[in-house]
Image: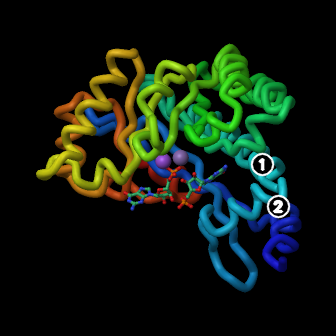
């Protein structure tokens, strides 16, 4: 497995980087935070997206080390953004994907507690994105972990919501603050068909349960406008911005100042 061998050395060789995709508050079109997304600049294969190597990283357990790296980078960046931006606006949050190999390790809780103590960021800065399939691997343990993580000030986002097989029951079962509606549902939003109704129902249900909603895959102004009419809090997608490097984020924040 050559890719696996390469991946073992990728962090030390500084080939792994974290990109950040903007998440926008729909009500005022203001930048609200970013999702951290791993990238691998492979020496011969070029830049690889997460889907090209996360599965290998999960199989081999390397995801634990990679995940720790992303978490520490993301929090370091968030602290940097807070220093860079004036205090008049809400602090930007950073949303980090977590795999099951990470979540079900005893020391993830300690790790996050230490990171939150090291970087002085406001409560709620760190959001952890967790998929429902991950939660279903061990629901009792997942609930326990999520409660610990929240007690340290991390927020929990249910990722890829609407793609699982019995999504709605999870909203009651798992402690979470935010729901990220999968882009497959947003794609047809505002157009004809059943998707707009499903979107509308998901947002309404989330709000009844006092959870915020991020709509993913916002690619057009129509998508954004439709989600805004539903009072969906946040939008993420190519319409607002692609995942960008640390440098690009810095330039973006500089332009906001
Ligand atoms: O941006 P991209 O197409 O590469 O992301 C594809 C998927 O890979 C994302 O939906 C996300 O679930 C996963 N992913 C991206 N970055 C990370 C990461 O840092 N950790 C984990 N566990 N998954 C990630
Ligand atoms: O699964 P996760 O939701 O964490 O996914 C983030 C992935 O979605 C990344 O791979 C990112 O590149 C991709 N993505 C982000 N915005 C858009 C978009 O507007 N359209 C499409 N097709 N993909 C997007
Ligand atoms: Mn995600
Ligand atoms: Na998602």
Quadrant assignment for the C terminus: top left
Q: Which residue is mark 1?
A: 69
Instruction: Locate residue 32, reporting x and y percent.
Output: 42, 35
Image mark for residue 11:
2
Residue 104, position as x, y percentages in the image:
78, 35
Q: Residue furthest bottom?
A: 44
**Residue 121 versus residue 143: which sits nearer the camera?**
143
User: Quarter of the image containing the N terminus?
Assistant: bottom right
SS at circle 2 = loop
In the image, is residue 125 above or below residue 195?
above
State if disc 2 and disc 1 touch (CB < 8 Å). yes
Q: Is mark 2 within 8 Å of ligand 1?
A: no
Question: Quick check: can you spot residue 254?
Answer: no
Q: Quadrant of ligand 2?
A: bottom left
Numbered badge on residue 224 = none
Above or below, comparing residue 166 to residue 47 in the picture: above
Q: Residue at x 69, y 66 (%)?
A: 53
Describe the element under mark 1 as helix, strand or loop: helix
* First along the sequence among labels 1 and 2: 2
Which residue is painted at 70% across and 23% down in the image? 140
Residue 142, relative to residue 133: is it above or below?
above
Q: Position of residue 154 (x, y in %)?
A: 63, 24
């Amino acid at each position: 497995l050559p890719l696996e061998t390469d991946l073992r050395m990728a962090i030390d060789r500084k080939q792994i980087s974290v990109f950040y995709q903007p998440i926008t508050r729909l009500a005022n079109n203001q930048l609200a935070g970013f999702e951290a997304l791993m990238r691998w600049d492979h020496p011969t294969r070029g830049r690889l997206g997460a889907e090209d190597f996360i599965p290998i990283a999960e199989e081999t357990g390397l995801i634990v080390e990679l995940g720790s790296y992303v978490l520490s980078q993301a929090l370091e960046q968030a602290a940097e953004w807070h220093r860079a931006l004036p205090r008049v606006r809400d602090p930007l949050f950073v949303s980090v994907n977590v795999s099951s190999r990470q979540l079900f390790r005893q020391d993830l809780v300690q790790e996050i507690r230490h990171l939150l103590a090291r970087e002085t960021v406001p409560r709620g800065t760190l959001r952890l994105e967790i998929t429902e399939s991950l939660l279903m691997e061990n629901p009792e343990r997942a609930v326990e972990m999520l409660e610990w993580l929240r007690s340290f000030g991390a927020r929990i986002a249910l990722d890829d919501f609407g793609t699982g097989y019995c999504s709605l029951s999870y909203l009651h079962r798992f402690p979470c603050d935010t729901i990220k509606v999968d882009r497959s549902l947003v794609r047809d939003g505002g157009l004809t068909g059943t998707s707009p109704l499903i979107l509308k129902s998901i947002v309404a249900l989330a709000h009844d349960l006092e959870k915020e909603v991020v709509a993913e895959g916002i690619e057009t102004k129509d998508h954004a406008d439709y989600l805004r009419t539903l009072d969906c809090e946040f939008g993420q997608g190519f319409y607002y911005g692609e995942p960008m490097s640390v440098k690009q984020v810095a330039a973006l924040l500089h332009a906001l100042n």
